[in-house]
Image (cartoon, rainbow, N blue to C red):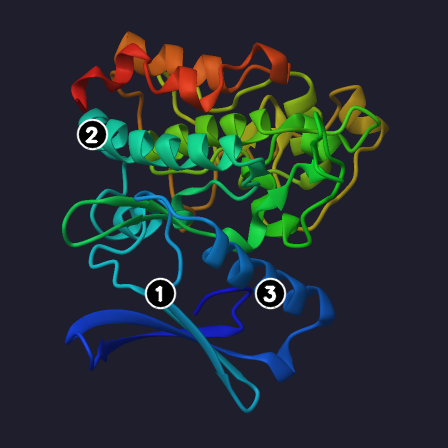
Amino acid sequence: MGFNNLSQVKMARHIPTGQLVALKQTNMDECTEEELLQLMNEVLLSRLLRHPNLLTSRLVFSSCCQLWVLTPLMDYGSADTLLRTHFPDGMSESLIAYLLHGVLKALEYLHRMGYVHRGVKASHIMLSGEGRVYLSGLYSVYSMMRDGKRMKAVFDMPHHSPALLPWLSPELLRQDLHGYGVKSDIYSLGIVACELFSGRVPFQDMPPTLMLLQKLRGSHCCLLDVPPFPLGEFGGLKVLRSGVDSGIGESVATGSLSHSATAPPADRPQSPGPKNHSATLHNLVQLCLQQQPERRPSAFELLSHAYFKQVS
């Protein structure tokens, strides 16, 4: 399943070339108006954008109410799939460097073309049978161009943001007059680095309001030399797993919540123990997760970071 669980992705054979491809089928009658606009955005961008590390469609057509999108087959699936099936406690640094380097090349191209991705996460990082890294999720891409001019900031909130909250930057979540720009993707890349290294998504089990407060305070919640995120409690505050925003009341502000649940239930997945990490990876994450976007390096600058010397 894909695209808000409205699409079915199947493997097919492209008869003219004999190659195996991925075929995404979406019933447009089941889509809302906003979802149809997202689909249209993805189709249009697939025609406009071309980059070796960007997953775009080869063919798009409709039949009755069905939209069919043909893309190259990603034999190894997404980085999220690899985490769940082969690396439950996180990937090696060499593999992480290889994946992130490919993503950065795609982001550098998108940013240069005047677009912000707004959906950088492990499930949007794809790996082909030839070992090439692709960045997918074009339905989340947003243009920074207005009336032929490039804007320094935009203010649109992604329609699919609830599923992306752990990866979104503080300035995007803040939704104030300053807006956000392409550096928002750099923050998301830092969250992805923690996700790939630990096998856990930072902030994932935190109520949305508390997540926002922690991000605005500059909390990373994914230091690489400590357990990335305690799934039972965080900072003395009880964490709910329902995914429903419980709000922040006076008891949270004064730190007077009950500590009765000091240990997570037995059936709850445990955070892995501390792992050794390189200084260059730690530095990369710190650069990406700086609260002020102007202090984060650009995608072009990050491509020359010392951590990626092992890729070249």
The crowd level at tag 1 (other Cα within 10 Å; few <14, some 14-19, many 20+) is few
Query: Could you tell me if residue 228 is visible in this image?
Result: yes
The image shows residue 3 at horizontal and vertical percentages of 52, 64
The image shows residue 73 at horizontal and vertical percentages of 25, 63
Q: Which residue is mark 2?
A: 92
Image disc number at residue 180:
none
In 3D space, how far apart are the residues under numbered discs 1 and 2 (Cα atoms)?
Answer: 33 Å
Q: Between residues 262 and 174, which one lies in front from this camera angle?
A: 174
In which quadrant is the N terminus drawn?
A: bottom left
The image shows residue 310 at horizontal and vertical percentages of 17, 19
Vertical position of residue 198 compared to residue 264: above or below: above
The crowd level at tag 3 (other Cα within 10 Å; few <14, some 14-19, many 20+) is few
Kindly identify the residue that appears in the image at 64 percent across and 84 percent down. Answer: 29
Q: Which residue is mark 1?
A: 58
- For numbered disc 2, what is the local secondary structure? loop
Q: Quadrant of residue 240?
A: top right
In 3D space, how far apart are the residues under numbered discs 1 and 3 (Cα atoms)?
Answer: 15 Å
Kindly identify the residue that appears in the image at 52 percent across and 36 percent down. Answer: 113
Q: Which residue is mark 3?
A: 40
State which mark lies toward you, 1 or 2: 1
